[in-house]
């Protein structure tokens, strides 16, 4: 009889040990976030002190703005919007911050290398956001990067 009690005690102790090891995982999983899994999307906001023409055009040599300076800025921002869509065409649950930022950075730094040395004072700010989406509705968003565009001095010739 003592031998049976000893085996029962050892079995119960093993069972209790197994429960003690598994229980924290079960509790942690069940106490997870109540927040649903949102789709990840990206968008840009544009705050400009100069008039912009943000219509996509196949002919980049034709501007619709009042000045060539505004045309160059408009074209650059349209390119950034296109790059954003190309880098992240469909919302998903993972997102791609690095890919989206790289796509916009490439256009921004190309613009800055050509015109940045001549710019004075910020006249346009473009912000990139990562958004948690419920369908087409932005539930919350976080700014990822800000791009500053300056004005070129009056009389600047290309």
Image: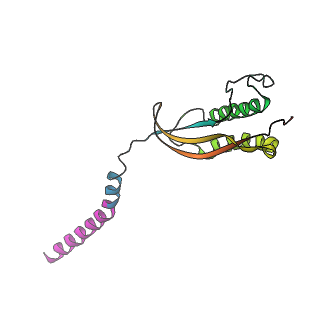
Q: Quadrant of residue 55?
A: top right
Residue at the image position 61 percent from the left and 46 percent from the top: 145
Query: Residue 47: x, y in percent?
Result: 61, 37
Nearer the observer, 108 or 94: 108
- Coloration mode: rainbow
- Residue extending farthest bottom: 2
Query: Residue 130: x, y in percent?
Result: 54, 42
Quarter of the image where the C terminus is located: top right
Quarter of the image where the N terminus is located: bottom left
Q: Quadrant of residue 125?
A: top right
Nearer the observer, 20 or 51: 51
Nearer the observer, 114 or 40: 114
Number of residue marks = 0
Query: Residue 76: x, y in percent?
Result: 72, 34
Query: Residue 71: x, y in percent?
Result: 75, 29
- Residue extending farthest left: 1
Specify whether 128 is left or right of 119: left
Specify whether 15 is left or right of 62: left
Residue at the image position 35 percent from the left and 56 percent from the top: 28
- Residue extending farthest right: 157
Residue at the image position 80 percent from the left and 40 percent from the top: 153
The majority secondary structure of the magenta stretch comes to helix
Q: Check if residue 4 falls in the magenta segment.
A: yes
Q: Check if residue 43 falls in the magenta segment.
A: no
Would you place residue 7 above or below residue 37 in this image? below
Specify whether 133 is left or right of 111: left
Specify whether 121 is left or right of 27: right
Span of residues in magenta: 1-23
């Amino acid at each position: 009889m003592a031998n049976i009690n000893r085996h029962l005690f050892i079995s119960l102790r093993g069972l209790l040990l197994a429960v003690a090891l598994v229980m924290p995982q079960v509790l942690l999983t069940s106490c997870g976030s109540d927040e649903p899994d949102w789709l990840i999307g990206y968008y840009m906001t544009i705050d400009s002190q100069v008039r912009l023409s943000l219509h996509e055009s196949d002919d980049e040599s034709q501007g619709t703005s009042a000045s060539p300076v505004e045309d160059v800025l408009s074209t650059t921002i349209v390119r950034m919007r296109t790059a954003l869509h190309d880098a992240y065409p469909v919302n998903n649950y993972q997102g791609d911050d690095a890919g989206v930022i790289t796509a916009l950075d490439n256009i921004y730094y190309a613009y800055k290398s050509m015109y940045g040395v001549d710019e004075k004072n910020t006249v346009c700010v473009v912000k990139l956001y990562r958004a948690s989406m419920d369908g087409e509705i932005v539930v919350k968003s976080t700014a990822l990067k800000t791009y500053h565009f300056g004005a070129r001095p009056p009389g600047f010739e290309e």
